[in-house]
Amino acid sequence: MVIEGVELRQAPPTDPDVLALTTAQQTELAATYGEDQPLVALHPDITFTVLTLDGTPVGCVGLQPVGPGLGEIKRMYVAPPARGWGLSRILLEAVEGQARATGLTRLRLETGTKQVEAIALYTNHGYLPTPPYPPFENEVASLCYAKAL
């Protein structure tokens, strides 16, 4: 999918755009789930893809290697004003391509039970429900998915 004005770039978890987008994501999740928890520090092995629209950062997704051939999608987010244009699909395809390029053969992720758009995105792209993995095994509002690449 090509959308005019969209650019992707790789960034570390310390990038100011990544920090702003992931903080906005965590704020939105806290409002959705009624929780006010501190932002969990990102693992330094995560590589982010930042999506800009006409030069403005509006989305991101992280990829963290977690084991032989296994990666985890972290902090996928598109800012509310930029939703509905297919940008999340672009991010998901980008992170899958990055995973393949680095030799990963399987991806996993966690999302929340109230994030119906995210659940639809993942299932429509071949992600299948999987048993919860740490630290989500006791989180009632968490759903885990995985996909062989």
Image: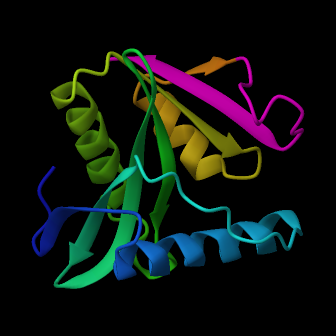
> Which residues, given as a range, are shown in magenta?
131-149
Question: How many marks can you see?
Answer: 0
> Is residue 86 visible in this depiction of the protein?
no
Residue 33: x %, y % from top left: 84, 63
Quadrant of residue 27 within the rendered picture: bottom right
Quadrant of residue 86 within the rendered picture: bottom left
Give the colour scheme of this rendering: rainbow
Is residue 134 within the magenta segment? yes
Residue 146: x %, y % from top left: 52, 22
Q: Main secondary structure of the magenta part?
A: loop
Q: Please report the residue visible at 40 percent of the width from the left and 54 percent of the height from the top.
A: 61
- Residue 60 lies, with reference to residue 64, above or below; the image says below
Is residue 102 within the magenta segment? no
Residue 107: x %, y % from top left: 43, 26
Classify residue 20 as left or right of residue 35: left
Q: Please report the residue visible at 40 percent of the width from the left and 49 percent of the height from the top.
A: 46
Classify residue 144 as left or right of residue 120: right
Q: Please report the residue visible at 78 percent of the width from the left and 70 percent of the height from the top.
A: 30
- Residue 112 lies, with reference to residue 86, above or below; the image says above
Classify residue 147 as left or right of residue 100: right
Comparing 141 with 126, the one in front is 141
> Is residue 46 visible in this depiction of the protein?
yes
- Residue 26 lies, with reference to residue 68, above or below; the image says below
Residue 109: x %, y % from top left: 56, 35
Tell me the quadrant of the picture where the C terminus can be found. Answer: top left
